[in-house]
Amino acid sequence: MLFLNINEPTPSEIREWMKLNNLNVRNASDALGISKRQFSRILSGESKAKRLHALAMQMVWLINENKKKIIDENQNKTLSKKKIKIPIR
C-alpha cells in the first residue's frame, strides 16, 4: 500500500488502507497512536494526515502482509508434513 503523496495521504487513500487491513476507526487510531477524534478529523478532511501518519500506516500494512505470509507458509507446512510409518511385528 503506497500513497501517491507520502507527505499528505488523502482521506480516500486512508479509507482504502483501513479496508486492506480490516480496521475500523478505533483500531486504526490505536494502531497509529492517535486519538479516535483526531483520526476522524483526518478521515473527514478537516485535518491533514502528516508524513508520520502515512509512514505508520505503511508499516502497519507491511506487518499485516507479513503475518498473512507467515500464516500461509505454516498452513502449507502442516499440509505437507511427512508421516513416518513404523511396521509393528
Image (spheres, rainbow, N blue to C red):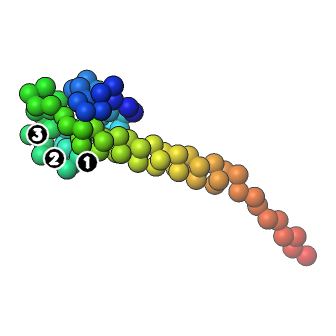
Q: Is residue 16 visible?
A: no
Marks 1/3 in contact by CB < 8 Å: the verdict is no
Q: Can residue 10 be seen in this view?
A: yes
In x, y percent, where is residue 63? 41, 48
Residue shown at the point (82%, 65%) measured from the top left: 85
Q: Quadrant of the N terminus?
A: top left
- Alpha-carbon neighbours of circle 1 within 10 Å: few (<14), some, or many (≥20)? some
Q: In what element is the residue under mark 2?
A: loop
Rendered view: 34 above or below 19: below
- Marks 2/1: CA–CA distance: 8 Å
In x, y percent, where is residue 32? 23, 46
Q: Name the residue under label 1.
A: 31
In x, y percent, where is residue 21? 35, 38
Q: Residue 38 carries which label?
A: 3
Residue shown at the point (75%, 58%) measured from the top left: 82
Q: In this view, does 87 lie to the left or right of 9?
A: right
Rendered view: 58 above or below 84: above
Circle 1: residue type? Ala
In x, y percent, where is residue 37? 8, 40
* The image quarter in which residue 2 lies: top left
Q: Name the residue under label 2.
A: 34
* The image quarter in which residue 65 lies: top left
- Marks 1/3: CA–CA distance: 13 Å
State the residue in front, 30 or 48. 48
